[in-house]
C-alpha cells in the first residue's frame, strides 16, 4: 500500500484543503446569507426544476459526519482506511463533512442552516483518509469501486496526487459504468501542476473562482482544466454540528458535483459524457475566447445547464427535453441570464490535422522520377548494344 503526505504534490494523494483562509466559526442563523456562491451559479432558480432527488453522490474523502443539515441525506457508506471498519460517517478531520454539505445539505425549517447545490441528493460517504497527513491510493481506488458498486452516479474526489495505476483503473471502470467523476485540480502554490485523478482522461477537472467571478489565485492553471466554480470564502458544515469558512478547489469540486447531480436528476437518460458536456457547454466563458488553461470552458452556470438546448454528443442516447417552464428569468442577486437557447458542445483544443495530400504528391513525384530513371536506363542499354 502506498502512503503519501499532502506536502508532496507530485506524488501525494492529498486533501485539496482550505488553501488561503483558515476555518472560522459562523452563526447558524446567518448561514443562508453567507452562501453567496449559490447565487453566483444561479442555484436558487433551479429549485423549481430539480433538487437532485433520486441521485446518489459519493464523497470520497475523510468521512462525513451526520451534521443536522445533512442527516436526512446521508447514507451508510464505507471506511477504506487501514484500520477502518465503519460506515464512512466518522470524520475526524472535517474536510469530507464540508464537501458533503456543499453538495447536498438540506438545511432546517425556517431557512435555518445551509442548503447545498442539490439538497435532495443522497450522499454516500466513503472514508479514505483519517487526516490531512496520511492518504493511500489503494484506499482511494477501493473507495471508487465501492461507490460504483453501491449506486453512485456521481463521484466527488476533492483529492490531488500523482498518477497511480489502481486509481486509473478505477476511473476507467467508473466511466464504463456511466458514472460522472468530478475532481479538483489542486491549490496553488502548494500544487504546481494539476493533480490526479483530475488529470485522467474522462474526469471533469475543476478549478476555482472567487467572489468576483474570475479565476481565483489559488486555482492551478493547466490545459486539462475544464470548468471553474466558486471556491473562495465558502461556508459549509463541520463535524461538530457547526459551520466554517474555507477556500480551495475542493469546494469548487463539490459545487460542480452538486450541479452534476441536478443534471442527472433532470436528464436521467444522459450518459456521463453528456452530463459533463452539458455542464461545460453551458459554462460562462470568463477568459480568452474558447477554452483556456485557467477555467477551461468557463464558469459553472447551473441554471443554463438545466435549461439550455445542448446537442448530444455523437453516439449517445436521446435525453429528456428541457422543460420550457424552467427558463423563467429572475432578478435575484448574482443572477446570470441564460439567454442562449441553443449551446453547441464545447470543442476540444484542435489537434494538428493530418493530411494525405503530401504523401500522395510524394508518391506521384517518386513514380515520375522512377519512371524517368527506368526510361533513361532503357535508352542507355539500347545505345550500348
Image: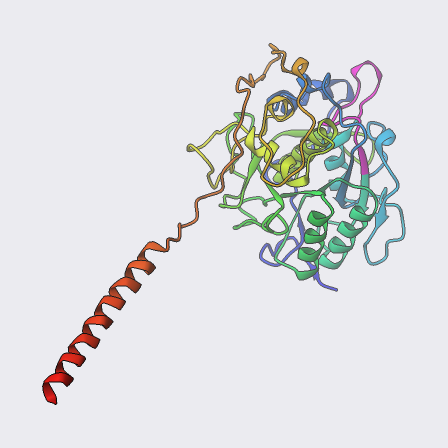
Q: Main secondary structure of the magenta part?
A: loop
Q: In the rendered view, would you say 158 is above or below 83?
A: above
116 in magenta: yes
Expressed as whole percent of the image width and height from the top left, the position of residue 189 reads 53, 46
Quadrant of the image for the C terminus? bottom left
Expressed as whole percent of the image width and height from the top left, the position of residue 354 reads 39, 53
Tell me: 226 left or right of 197.
left
The reply to whether residue 300 is visible in this rendering is yes
Please give the name of the residue rendered at 23% of the width and 71% of the height, measured from the top-left corner. 371
Expressed as whole percent of the image width and height from the top left, the position of residue 318 reads 67, 32
Q: Residue furthest left?
A: 383
Q: Residue furthest bottom?
A: 385
| Residue placed most toward the observer, 260 or 6 | 260
Quadrant of the image for the N terminus? bottom right
Q: Residue furthest top?
A: 331
> How many numbered discs sit on the rendered protein?
0
| Residue placed most toward the observer, 313 or 286 | 313
Expressed as whole percent of the image width and height from the top left, the position of residue 83 reads 86, 57
| Residue placed most toward the observer, 347 or 89 | 347
Dividing the picture into quarters, in which one does residue 55 lie?
A: top right
51 in magenta: no
Dividing the picture into quarters, in which one does residue 8 lie?
A: bottom right
Please give the name of the residue rendered at 55% of the width and 31% of the height, measured from the top-left corner. 281
Please give the name of the residue rendered at 82% of the width and 42% of the height, measured from the top-left corner. 151
How is the structure coloured here? rainbow
The reply to whether residue 231 is visible in this rendering is no
Tell me: 1 left or right of 246.
right
Tell me: 86 left or right of 51.
right
Q: Which residues are magenta?
A: 106-123
Amino acid at each position: 500500500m502506498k502512503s503519501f503526505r499532502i506536502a508532496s504534490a507530485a506524488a501525494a494523494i492529498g486533501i485539496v484543503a482550505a488553501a488561503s483562509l483558515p476555518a472560522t466559526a459562523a452563526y447558524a442563523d446567518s448561514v443562508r446569507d453567507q452562501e453567496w456562491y449559490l447565487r453566483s451559479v444561479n442555484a436558487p432558480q433551479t429549485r423549481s426544476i430539480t433538487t437532485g432527488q433520486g441521485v446518489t453522490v459519493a464523497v470520497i474523502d475523510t468521512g462525513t459526519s451526520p451534521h443536522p443539515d445533512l442527516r436526512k441525506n446521508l447514507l451508510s457508506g464505507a471506511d477504506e482506511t487501514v484500520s477502518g471498519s465503519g460506515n464512512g460517517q466518522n470524520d475526524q478531520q472535517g474536510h469530507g463533512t464540508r464537501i458533503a454539505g456543499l453538495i447536498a445539505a438540506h438545511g432546517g425549517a425556517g431557512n435555518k442552516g445551509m442548503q447545498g447545490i442539490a439538497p435532495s441528493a443522497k450522499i454516500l460517504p466513503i472514508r479514505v483518509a483519517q487526516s490531512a497527513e496520511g492518504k493511500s491510493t489503494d484506499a482511494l481506488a477501493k473507495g471508487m469501486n465501492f461507490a460504483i458498486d453501491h449506486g453512485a452516479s456521481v463521484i466527488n474526489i476533492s483529492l490531488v496526487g500523482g498518477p497511480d495505476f489502481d486509481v486509473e483503473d478505477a476511473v476507467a471502470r467508473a466511466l464504463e459504468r456511466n458514472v460522472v467523476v468530478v475532481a479538483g485540480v489542486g491549490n496553488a502554490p502548494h500544487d504546481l501542476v494539476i493533480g490526479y485523478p483530475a488529470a485522467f482522461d474522462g474526469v471533469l477537472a475543476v478549478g476555482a473562482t472567487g467572489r468576483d467571478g474570475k479565476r481565483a489565485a489559488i486555482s492551478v492553471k493547466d490545459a486539462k482544466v475544464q470548468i471553474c466554480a466558486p471556491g473562495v470564502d465558502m461556508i459549509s458544515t463541520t463535524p461538530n454540528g457547526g459551520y466554517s469558512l474555507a477556500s480551495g478547489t475542493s469546494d469548487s469540486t463539490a459545487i460542480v458535483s452538486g450541479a452534476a447531480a441536478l443534471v442527472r436528476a433532470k436528464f436521467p437518460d444522459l450518459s456521463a459524457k453528456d452530463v459533463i458536456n452539458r455542464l461545460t457547454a453551458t459554462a460562462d466563458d470568463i477568459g480568452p475566447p474558447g477554452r483556456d488553461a485557467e477555467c477551461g470552458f468557463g464558469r459553472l452556470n447551473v441554471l443554463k445547464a438545466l435549461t439550455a438546448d445542448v446537442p448530444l454528443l455523437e453516439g449517445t442516447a436521446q435525453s429528456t427535453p428541457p422543460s420550457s417552464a424552467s427558463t423563467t428569468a429572475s432578478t435575484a442577486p448574482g443572477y446570470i441570464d441564460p439567454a442562449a437557447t441553443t449551446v453547441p458542445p464545447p470543442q476540444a483544443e484542435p489537434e494538428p490535422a493530418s493530411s494525405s495530400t503530401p504523401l500522395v504528391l510524394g508518391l506521384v513525384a517518386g513514380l515520375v522520377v522512377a519512371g524517368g530513371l527506368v526510361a533513361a536506363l532503357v535508352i542507355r542499354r539500347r545505345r550500348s548494344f
